[in-house]
Image (cartoon, grey):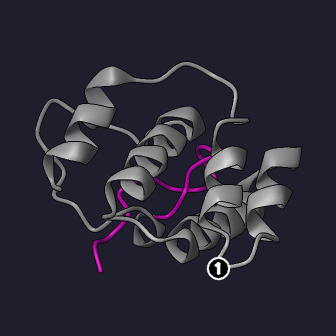
Amino acid sequence: MRENPFRAEDNPRTIPFEFLPDLPILPGIMATTPNHRTMAEYYIRGITQGFVTAAEVIRWADEVIVASAKTEDWMLDISTAGEDDRMGVLHHLHEVKGEIDQEALAGLLAGK
């Protein structure tokens, strides 16, 4: 397990590294934890390309809920989805709002 160099008290939206995909951090690409929309896009691609399971996404959503000051509907929808409901999880990932950090996404996908 990688050590998290970011302290949660510095950023309440920080997700512990142990709940991110086990990928190397590429210098200059991911200096911080990717935002929720970027992670959702990574998981969308992972589910559709077969390198991520719904169970992994559900675990991520559970940890996002714990780390977030405000719970959003998509978080709960993913967290309560069944591990065999791949399409349902995929649908809820599309509900995550925000901008995709293309550099961070490229770094995440580079490890796959």
Q: Is residue 24 above or below residue 34?
A: below
Residue at point 38%, 39% (across, down): 32
- Residue type at tag 1: Glu
Chain part drawn in magenta: 1-16
Residue 20 position, x and y percent, is 41, 62
Confirm whether the magenta stretch covers residue 95.
no
Q: Is residue 59 above or below residue 41?
A: below
Quarter in which the C terminus is drawn = bottom left
Residue at point 46%, 71% (across, down): 53
Asked if one can make out residue 41 in the rendered structure from this viewpoint, the answer is yes
Confirm whether the magenta stretch covers residue 7.
yes
Asked if one can make out residue 70 in the rendered structure from this viewpoint, the answer is no
Name the residue nearer the viewer: 14 or 82.
Answer: 82
Category of crowding for the residue at label 1, using alpha-carbon neighbours closer than 10 angstroms: few (below 14), some (14–19), many (at least 20) = some
Residue 83 position, x and y percent, is 64, 79
Residue at point 30%, 81% (across, down): 1
Residue at point 19%, 51% (across, down): 25
Name the residue nearer the viewer: 105 or 65.
Answer: 105
Task: Return the residue at label 1.
Answer: 83
Q: Is residue 75 above or below residue 85?
A: above
Q: How many marks?
A: 1
Residue 19 position, x and y percent, is 47, 69
Quadrant in which residue 24 is drawn: bottom left
Residue 15 position, x and y percent, is 54, 57
Q: Secondary structure at mark 1?
A: loop
**Is the magenta region chiefly helix, strand or loop?**
loop
